[in-house]
Image (tube, grey):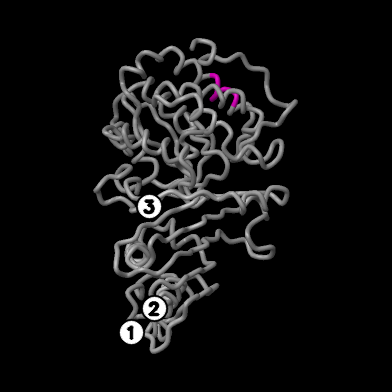
Amino acid sequence: MHPEIEFDIVIGNPPYGDILNQNEEMFTAPYLTGSVNDVSAPFVERQLQLTAEHGYFGNVTTLRLIYQSSLEEFHDLLRSTLAPARVACFGMWGRVGVFENALVRVALLSGQKNTNTQGAIHTSDFTVFNRDNRQHRFENLEYSPVDGLILRDRISGDGSGGPLLPKIGGDMKRDILLQLKDYSHTIFEDKYEQDPTGEDEYPVWRREGAGYWINPMMEELYEAREVEPVYFDSELEQKTAFLVLNSSLYYVYWMTYGNQHHHNWTQLSAFPWPNESVVEEYEDEIIELADTLWYRMKDGFSGSSFRMTALRPIVDDVDVLMGELYDLTDEQVEYTQRYLTDLGEGSARAGSGDEDLTYNPIVAETD
Protein backbone atom coordinates (compact mmCIF):
# COMPACT_ATOMS: atom_id res chain seq x y z
CA MET A 1 0.00 0.00 0.00
CA HIS A 2 2.06 2.94 -1.29
CA PRO A 3 0.93 6.46 -2.17
CA GLU A 4 1.11 7.96 -5.64
CA ILE A 5 1.95 11.30 -4.04
CA GLU A 6 4.36 12.21 -1.25
CA PHE A 7 4.80 15.26 0.95
CA ASP A 8 7.91 16.86 2.38
CA ILE A 9 6.09 17.64 5.63
CA VAL A 10 3.22 15.65 7.14
CA ILE A 11 1.48 16.81 10.32
CA GLY A 12 -1.51 15.11 11.88
CA ASN A 13 -3.77 14.65 14.89
CA PRO A 14 -5.46 11.28 14.25
CA PRO A 15 -8.44 9.86 16.12
CA TYR A 16 -7.58 7.34 18.82
CA GLY A 17 -9.12 4.49 20.75
CA ASP A 18 -10.61 1.09 20.03
CA ILE A 19 -13.51 2.63 18.12
CA LEU A 20 -13.84 0.59 14.90
CA ASN A 21 -16.61 -1.91 14.34
CA GLN A 22 -16.08 -5.18 12.47
CA ASN A 23 -16.92 -3.70 9.08
CA GLU A 24 -14.62 -0.71 9.57
CA GLU A 25 -11.73 -2.97 10.60
CA MET A 26 -11.69 -4.31 7.02
CA PHE A 27 -10.17 -1.00 5.92
CA THR A 28 -7.27 -1.13 8.43
CA ALA A 29 -6.55 -4.87 8.08
CA PRO A 30 -4.00 -4.45 5.21
CA TYR A 31 -1.77 -2.23 7.33
CA LEU A 32 1.19 -3.57 9.31
CA THR A 33 -0.51 -2.10 12.39
CA GLY A 34 -3.96 -3.33 11.40
CA SER A 35 -4.13 -5.69 14.39
CA VAL A 36 -3.46 -2.88 16.88
CA ASN A 37 -6.64 -2.17 18.82
CA ASP A 38 -6.22 1.60 18.56
CA VAL A 39 -7.22 3.33 15.34
CA SER A 40 -4.42 5.89 15.71
CA ALA A 41 -1.76 3.28 14.79
CA PRO A 42 -2.84 2.70 11.16
CA PHE A 43 -3.47 6.45 10.83
CA VAL A 44 0.17 7.09 11.82
CA GLU A 45 1.33 4.32 9.47
CA ARG A 46 -0.56 5.85 6.54
CA GLN A 47 0.90 9.28 7.25
CA LEU A 48 4.40 7.81 7.33
CA GLN A 49 3.74 6.31 3.89
CA LEU A 50 2.74 9.76 2.64
CA THR A 51 5.95 11.33 3.99
CA ALA A 52 8.69 11.63 1.37
CA GLU A 53 12.10 10.11 2.02
CA HIS A 54 14.05 12.63 4.15
CA GLY A 55 10.79 14.52 4.70
CA TYR A 56 9.55 15.51 8.15
CA PHE A 57 6.75 13.90 10.13
CA GLY A 58 4.88 15.13 13.20
CA ASN A 59 1.80 13.81 15.00
CA VAL A 60 -0.14 14.63 18.13
CA THR A 61 -1.63 11.33 19.25
CA THR A 62 -2.34 9.11 22.24
CA LEU A 63 0.48 8.09 24.58
CA ARG A 64 -1.09 4.64 24.64
CA LEU A 65 0.96 3.95 21.49
CA ILE A 66 4.05 4.17 23.67
CA TYR A 67 3.17 2.71 27.06
CA GLN A 68 0.96 -0.21 25.99
CA SER A 69 2.94 -3.47 25.97
CA SER A 70 1.19 -5.07 22.97
CA LEU A 71 2.38 -2.53 20.38
CA GLU A 72 5.81 -3.89 19.50
CA GLU A 73 4.98 -3.94 15.77
CA PHE A 74 4.12 -0.24 15.94
CA HIS A 75 7.40 0.54 17.67
CA ASP A 76 9.26 -1.45 15.00
CA LEU A 77 7.47 0.64 12.36
CA LEU A 78 8.76 3.84 13.96
CA ARG A 79 12.31 2.45 14.10
CA SER A 80 12.26 1.38 10.46
CA THR A 81 10.87 4.68 9.18
CA LEU A 82 12.22 7.56 11.29
CA ALA A 83 15.85 8.19 12.25
CA PRO A 84 15.34 8.80 15.07
CA ALA A 85 11.71 8.83 16.16
CA ARG A 86 11.28 11.36 18.96
CA VAL A 87 8.41 10.95 21.38
CA ALA A 88 7.46 13.71 23.81
CA CYS A 89 5.39 12.04 26.55
CA PHE A 90 2.78 14.05 28.48
CA GLY A 91 0.67 13.03 31.45
CA MET A 92 -1.95 14.91 33.43
CA TRP A 93 -2.05 16.78 36.73
CA GLY A 94 -5.61 16.94 37.95
CA ARG A 95 -7.49 18.46 35.05
CA VAL A 96 -4.39 20.05 33.50
CA GLY A 97 -3.03 18.40 30.35
CA VAL A 98 -1.85 19.23 26.85
CA PHE A 99 -5.40 20.01 25.70
CA GLU A 100 -7.65 22.37 27.58
CA ASN A 101 -10.84 20.35 27.17
CA ALA A 102 -9.61 16.76 26.75
CA LEU A 103 -8.18 14.74 29.64
CA VAL A 104 -5.84 12.48 27.66
CA ARG A 105 -2.23 11.43 27.94
CA VAL A 106 -0.53 12.70 24.81
CA ALA A 107 2.41 11.64 22.66
CA LEU A 108 4.03 14.09 20.24
CA LEU A 109 5.71 11.93 17.57
CA SER A 110 8.24 13.56 15.27
CA GLY A 111 11.21 12.73 13.11
CA GLN A 112 12.82 12.74 9.69
CA LYS A 113 11.97 9.85 7.41
CA ASN A 114 14.91 7.64 6.51
CA THR A 115 14.12 4.08 5.46
CA ASN A 116 17.71 3.32 4.45
CA THR A 117 18.96 2.95 8.00
CA GLN A 118 17.64 1.34 11.16
CA GLY A 119 16.50 4.18 13.36
CA ALA A 120 15.88 4.40 17.08
CA ILE A 121 13.20 5.69 19.43
CA HIS A 122 14.09 8.57 21.75
CA THR A 123 11.65 9.51 24.51
CA SER A 124 11.16 12.36 26.93
CA ASP A 125 10.32 11.92 30.58
CA PHE A 126 6.65 11.41 31.45
CA THR A 127 6.07 15.16 31.60
CA VAL A 128 3.47 16.56 34.01
CA PHE A 129 2.89 20.28 34.54
CA ASN A 130 0.60 22.89 36.04
CA ARG A 131 -0.61 26.09 34.40
CA ASP A 132 2.35 28.05 35.79
CA ASN A 133 5.18 25.85 34.52
CA ARG A 134 3.53 24.48 31.36
CA GLN A 135 5.51 26.67 28.95
CA HIS A 136 8.81 25.97 30.70
CA ARG A 137 8.17 22.21 30.49
CA PHE A 138 7.36 22.40 26.78
CA GLU A 139 10.47 24.45 25.99
CA ASN A 140 12.93 22.27 27.96
CA LEU A 141 12.18 18.71 26.89
CA GLU A 142 15.12 16.31 26.81
CA TYR A 143 15.27 12.96 25.02
CA SER A 144 17.22 9.72 25.39
CA PRO A 145 17.25 6.49 23.35
CA VAL A 146 15.20 3.62 24.75
CA ASP A 147 17.43 0.82 23.48
CA GLY A 148 18.96 -1.19 26.31
CA LEU A 149 16.30 -0.06 28.78
CA ILE A 150 13.11 -1.71 27.49
CA LEU A 151 11.30 -3.59 30.26
CA ARG A 152 10.40 -7.25 29.76
CA ASP A 153 10.93 -9.74 32.57
CA ARG A 154 13.50 -7.21 33.84
CA ILE A 155 15.13 -4.05 32.52
CA SER A 156 16.74 -5.00 29.19
CA GLY A 157 15.65 -8.60 29.71
CA ASP A 158 14.56 -11.06 27.03
CA GLY A 159 11.66 -12.72 28.85
CA SER A 160 8.00 -12.78 27.93
CA GLY A 161 6.94 -9.75 29.99
CA GLY A 162 6.24 -6.40 28.36
CA PRO A 163 7.80 -5.03 26.27
CA LEU A 164 7.35 -1.63 27.90
CA LEU A 165 9.14 1.37 26.38
CA PRO A 166 10.74 3.67 28.95
CA LYS A 167 9.88 7.37 29.06
CA ILE A 168 13.33 8.71 29.89
CA GLY A 169 14.25 12.32 29.23
CA GLY A 170 17.70 13.55 30.27
CA ASP A 171 20.97 11.92 31.31
CA MET A 172 20.21 11.89 35.04
CA LYS A 173 17.20 9.64 34.69
CA ARG A 174 18.90 7.47 32.10
CA ASP A 175 21.86 6.92 34.45
CA ILE A 176 19.47 5.91 37.26
CA LEU A 177 17.78 3.38 34.96
CA LEU A 178 21.17 2.00 33.91
CA GLN A 179 22.05 1.58 37.60
CA LEU A 180 18.82 -0.33 38.19
CA LYS A 181 19.59 -2.44 35.12
CA ASP A 182 22.94 -3.38 36.68
CA TYR A 183 21.08 -4.59 39.80
CA SER A 184 18.60 -6.70 37.84
CA HIS A 185 20.36 -10.04 38.33
CA THR A 186 17.86 -10.52 41.18
CA ILE A 187 14.36 -9.07 40.86
CA PHE A 188 11.25 -8.83 43.03
CA GLU A 189 9.72 -11.88 41.35
CA ASP A 190 12.60 -13.96 42.71
CA LYS A 191 11.65 -12.94 46.25
CA TYR A 192 7.89 -13.26 46.57
CA GLU A 193 5.10 -15.77 46.07
CA GLN A 194 1.58 -14.78 45.07
CA ASP A 195 -0.01 -17.69 46.94
CA PRO A 196 0.39 -18.28 50.69
CA THR A 197 2.75 -21.10 51.56
CA GLY A 198 1.02 -22.11 54.80
CA GLU A 199 4.17 -21.38 56.79
CA ASP A 200 5.18 -18.10 58.37
CA GLU A 201 3.93 -15.46 55.97
CA TYR A 202 5.18 -11.92 55.56
CA PRO A 203 2.79 -10.18 53.14
CA VAL A 204 2.86 -6.85 51.37
CA TRP A 205 -0.39 -5.79 49.72
CA ARG A 206 -0.05 -4.32 46.24
CA ARG A 207 -2.69 -1.85 45.05
CA GLU A 208 -3.39 -1.87 41.31
CA GLY A 209 -4.47 1.76 41.20
CA ALA A 210 -1.85 4.44 41.81
CA GLY A 211 -1.45 8.17 41.32
CA TYR A 212 1.29 10.16 43.01
CA TRP A 213 1.99 7.46 45.61
CA ILE A 214 2.16 3.68 45.23
CA ASN A 215 0.93 3.01 48.80
CA PRO A 216 1.69 -0.66 49.41
CA MET A 217 0.35 -1.99 52.71
CA MET A 218 1.73 -4.36 55.35
CA GLU A 219 -1.80 -5.10 56.56
CA GLU A 220 -5.00 -5.38 54.56
CA LEU A 221 -6.70 -2.19 55.70
CA TYR A 222 -9.53 -2.60 53.21
CA GLU A 223 -10.78 -5.23 50.78
CA ALA A 224 -11.04 -4.54 47.06
CA ARG A 225 -10.58 -6.43 43.82
CA GLU A 226 -7.44 -4.47 42.98
CA VAL A 227 -5.72 -5.15 46.34
CA GLU A 228 -3.70 -8.37 46.35
CA PRO A 229 -0.90 -9.66 48.59
CA VAL A 230 2.53 -11.03 47.77
CA TYR A 231 4.36 -13.12 50.36
CA PHE A 232 7.99 -12.90 51.40
CA ASP A 233 10.13 -15.39 53.35
CA SER A 234 11.15 -13.11 56.21
CA GLU A 235 10.30 -9.94 58.06
CA LEU A 236 13.43 -8.28 56.66
CA GLU A 237 12.41 -9.04 53.07
CA GLN A 238 8.85 -7.90 53.75
CA LYS A 239 9.94 -4.57 55.17
CA THR A 240 12.60 -4.04 52.53
CA ALA A 241 9.94 -4.52 49.84
CA PHE A 242 7.52 -2.21 51.64
CA LEU A 243 10.12 0.58 51.76
CA VAL A 244 11.27 0.07 48.17
CA LEU A 245 7.70 0.31 46.88
CA ASN A 246 7.12 3.49 48.91
CA SER A 247 10.32 5.10 47.71
CA SER A 248 10.71 7.92 45.21
CA LEU A 249 13.13 5.69 43.28
CA TYR A 250 10.38 3.15 42.66
CA TYR A 251 7.95 5.95 41.78
CA VAL A 252 10.35 7.27 39.11
CA TYR A 253 10.64 3.71 37.74
CA TRP A 254 6.86 3.29 37.77
CA MET A 255 6.30 6.53 35.87
CA THR A 256 9.01 5.49 33.40
CA TYR A 257 7.28 2.24 32.47
CA GLY A 258 3.66 2.94 33.43
CA ASN A 259 0.60 4.88 32.36
CA GLN A 260 0.21 7.13 35.45
CA HIS A 261 -2.65 4.99 36.74
CA HIS A 262 -2.11 1.20 36.85
CA HIS A 263 0.52 -0.51 38.99
CA ASN A 264 0.74 -3.81 37.15
CA TRP A 265 2.48 -7.09 37.89
CA THR A 266 5.09 -6.67 35.16
CA GLN A 267 6.37 -3.48 36.79
CA LEU A 268 6.38 -4.95 40.29
CA SER A 269 7.95 -8.29 39.43
CA ALA A 270 10.72 -6.78 37.26
CA PHE A 271 12.04 -4.24 39.76
CA PRO A 272 15.60 -5.05 40.91
CA TRP A 273 16.13 -6.45 44.38
CA PRO A 274 18.98 -4.76 46.31
CA ASN A 275 22.21 -6.52 47.19
CA GLU A 276 21.60 -8.94 50.09
CA SER A 277 24.75 -7.95 51.98
CA VAL A 278 23.70 -4.27 51.98
CA VAL A 279 20.17 -5.20 53.10
CA GLU A 280 21.66 -7.14 56.01
CA GLU A 281 23.99 -4.25 56.84
CA TYR A 282 20.99 -1.93 57.16
CA GLU A 283 18.64 -4.45 58.81
CA ASP A 284 18.00 -2.40 61.95
CA GLU A 285 17.35 0.79 60.00
CA ILE A 286 15.07 -1.02 57.52
CA ILE A 287 12.88 -2.51 60.24
CA GLU A 288 12.66 0.69 62.26
CA LEU A 289 11.98 2.87 59.22
CA ALA A 290 9.34 0.49 57.81
CA ASP A 291 7.57 0.31 61.19
CA THR A 292 7.65 4.10 61.52
CA LEU A 293 6.32 4.72 58.02
CA TRP A 294 3.58 2.10 58.30
CA TYR A 295 2.43 3.43 61.68
CA ARG A 296 2.17 6.94 60.22
CA MET A 297 0.43 5.70 57.07
CA LYS A 298 -2.21 3.88 59.10
CA ASP A 299 -2.67 6.97 61.25
CA GLY A 300 -3.55 9.00 58.14
CA PHE A 301 -5.65 6.31 56.44
CA SER A 302 -9.26 7.01 55.51
CA GLY A 303 -11.54 4.78 53.47
CA SER A 304 -9.11 3.58 50.82
CA SER A 305 -6.58 6.42 50.75
CA PHE A 306 -3.54 7.57 52.67
CA ARG A 307 -2.55 11.13 53.53
CA MET A 308 1.00 10.92 52.23
CA THR A 309 2.02 14.54 51.65
CA ALA A 310 2.58 15.14 55.37
CA LEU A 311 4.85 12.06 55.45
CA ARG A 312 7.29 13.55 52.97
CA PRO A 313 10.11 13.78 55.60
CA ILE A 314 9.89 10.01 56.20
CA VAL A 315 9.82 9.29 52.47
CA ASP A 316 12.92 11.48 52.07
CA ASP A 317 14.64 9.24 54.62
CA VAL A 318 13.47 6.15 52.71
CA ASP A 319 15.05 7.69 49.62
CA VAL A 320 18.39 8.11 51.41
CA LEU A 321 18.20 4.41 52.27
CA MET A 322 17.52 3.57 48.61
CA GLY A 323 20.71 5.41 47.73
CA GLU A 324 22.61 2.98 49.95
CA LEU A 325 20.74 -0.12 48.76
CA TYR A 326 21.21 0.67 45.06
CA ASP A 327 24.50 2.59 45.25
CA LEU A 328 23.07 5.84 43.90
CA THR A 329 24.97 9.11 43.98
CA ASP A 330 23.75 11.96 46.18
CA GLU A 331 22.65 13.79 43.04
CA GLN A 332 20.60 10.80 41.88
CA VAL A 333 18.93 10.48 45.28
CA GLU A 334 18.10 14.18 45.22
CA TYR A 335 16.64 13.82 41.71
CA THR A 336 14.24 11.12 42.90
CA GLN A 337 13.29 13.15 45.98
CA ARG A 338 12.43 16.20 43.83
CA TYR A 339 10.49 14.24 41.23
CA LEU A 340 7.03 15.83 40.72
CA THR A 341 7.37 18.08 43.76
CA ASP A 342 7.12 21.37 41.82
CA LEU A 343 3.39 21.38 41.08
CA GLY A 344 2.42 23.23 44.24
CA GLU A 345 2.66 22.75 48.01
CA GLY A 346 0.80 19.62 49.04
CA SER A 347 0.31 18.64 45.38
CA ALA A 348 1.57 15.53 43.60
CA ARG A 349 4.62 14.32 45.58
CA ALA A 350 5.37 17.59 47.36
CA GLY A 351 5.17 17.89 51.13
CA SER A 352 2.46 19.90 52.82
CA GLY A 353 4.71 22.59 54.25
CA ASP A 354 3.95 23.56 57.84
CA GLU A 355 1.68 20.53 58.18
CA ASP A 356 4.57 18.08 57.65
CA LEU A 357 5.20 15.92 60.69
CA THR A 358 8.20 16.43 62.95
CA TYR A 359 10.58 13.58 62.20
CA ASN A 360 14.12 12.68 63.22
CA PRO A 361 15.81 10.78 60.36
CA ILE A 362 16.66 7.16 61.03
CA VAL A 363 18.96 6.57 58.05
CA ALA A 364 20.26 9.99 57.04
CA GLU A 365 21.93 10.67 60.36
CA THR A 366 23.80 7.35 60.27
CA ASP A 367 25.58 8.11 56.99
* SS class, disc 2: helix
- Magenta stretch, main secondary structure, is helix
Residues tagged 1 and 3 counted as in contact (Cβ below 8 A): no
Dot label at residue 164: 3
Could you tell which of marks 1 and 3 lies nearer the N-terminus? 1
Dot 3 alpha-carbon crowd within 10 angstroms: few under 14, some 14 to 19, many 20 or more = many
**Residue 242: x percent and y percent?**
45, 29
The residue lying at 46 percent from left, 43 percent from top is 254
Of residues 266 and 181, the one nearer the viewer is 181
Can you say whether 328 is above or below 132 in the image?
Answer: above
Amino acid type of disc 3?
Leu
Residues tagged 2 and 3 counted as in contact (Cβ below 8 A): no
Q: Nearer the viewer, mark 1 or mark 3?
A: 1
Amino acid type of disc 1?
Met
The residue lying at 33 percent from left, 37 percent from top is 181
**Residue 4: x percent and y percent?**
39, 89
Residues tagged 1 and 2 counted as in contact (Cβ below 8 A): yes
Residue indicated by mark 2: 49
